[in-house]
């Protein structure tokens, strides 16, 4: 069975500072990994995904995540955050074959302070 | 492009009432999902449909039923609503490696 753990429920950070949101996964089979962002009163939007190949994946708005198989982690990072990055971030995993069932972590609320 | 459309956006039910949440996608995706989101618990999978004509239980299926009406539509039914079903419900669809695409959610309150 798959599971995803996000240990930090809230992360406050000052504007222009770097941030790392942690995600660890557990699975007996290969997985694909995803980060989603949710702005207030909206649905989830796909931020980036790791399927295979390069372990470092990037989004168009400056976020990046690194797949680390030995540590079963997929942490999300941004070198300099903006006020507009304030949102809830969810890590998710899915199997790599058959039915793509997405399992989500409990989310990390990122609050960027001026 | 509309993507994934959910109706209604808000609903208040009395305990014991029934209702159906509607979801439609226009991306020709095979797979569709229903999740519920509760504070501190993330998104939990209620039911999913890998393809038209198939449905399977997720993590929290009790008290819910689903229908995959056709490739576009996947509805979620509460037969006898309970306060514990107060939540925000999200429908999503996906195709292979593209990740899941979500609707805007239905905020349901059961009193």
Image (tube, coloured by chain):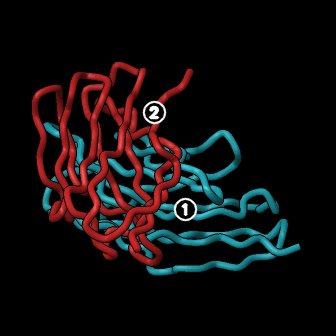
Chain colours: A cyan, B red
Q: Are marks 1 and 2 on the same chain?
A: no
Between B11 and A35, the residue placed more toward the observer is: B11
Of all chains, the one bearing label 1 is: A
Furthest-right residue in view? A114
Q: Is residue B58 left or right of residue A91?
A: left
Residue B73 position in % (x across, y down): 30, 29
Q: Dividing the picture into quarters, in which one does residue A74 lie?
A: bottom left
Kind of element beneath mark 1: strand
Q: Is residue A27 left or right of residue B12?
A: left
Residue A37 position in % (x across, y down): 57, 54
Residue A48 position in % (x across, y down): 51, 45
Relative to B98, is B13 above or below?
Answer: below
Q: For marks 1 and 2, give the CA distance.
A: 20 Å
Residue at the location (49% across, 28% down)? B3
Q: What residue would you read off at disc 2?
A: B4
Residue at the location (36% across, 67% down)? B14
Between B35 and A106, the residue placed more toward the observer is: B35
Q: What residue would you read off at disc 1?
A: A89
For residue A22, say whether it is visible: yes
Kind of element beneath mark 2: strand
Of all chains, the one bearing label 2 is: B
Q: Quadrant of the C terminus of chain B?
A: bottom left
Residue at the location (31% across, 63% down)? B44
For residue A71, say whether it is visible: no
**Residue A63 has which mark?**
none
Q: Nearer the viewer, mark 1 or mark 2?
A: 2
Residue at the location (44% across, 38% down)? B101
Q: Is residue B37 left or right of residue B70?
A: right
């Amino acid at each position: 069975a798959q599971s995803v753990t996000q240990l930090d429920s809230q992360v406050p950070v000052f504007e222009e500072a770097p941030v790392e949101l942690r995600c660890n996964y557990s699975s007996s089979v290969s997985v694909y990994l995803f980060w989603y962002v949710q702005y207030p009163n909206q649905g989830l939007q796909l931020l980036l995904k790791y399927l295979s190949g390069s372990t470092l994946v990037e989004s168009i708005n400056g976020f990046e995540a690194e797949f680390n198989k030995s540590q079963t982690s997929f942490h999300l990072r941004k070198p300099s955050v903006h006020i507009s990055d304030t949102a809830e971030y969810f890590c998710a995993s899915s199997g790599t074959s058959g039915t793509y069932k997405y399992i989500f972590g409990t989310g990390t609320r990122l609050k960027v302070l001026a | 492009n509309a993507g994934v459309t959910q109706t209604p956006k808000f609903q208040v039910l009395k305990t014991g009432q029934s209702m159906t949440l509607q979801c439609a996608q226009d991306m020709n995706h095979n797979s569709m999902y229903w999740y519920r989101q509760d504070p501190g618990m993330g998104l939990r999978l209620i039911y999913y449909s890998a393809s038209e004509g198939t449905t399977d239980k997720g993590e929290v299926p009790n008290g819910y039923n689903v229908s995959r009406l056709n490739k576009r539509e996947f509805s979620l039914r509460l037969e006898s609503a309970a306060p514990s079903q107060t939540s925000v419900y999200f429908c999503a669809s996906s195709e292979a490696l593209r990740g899941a695409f979500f609707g805007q959610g239905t905020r349901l309150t059961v009193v």
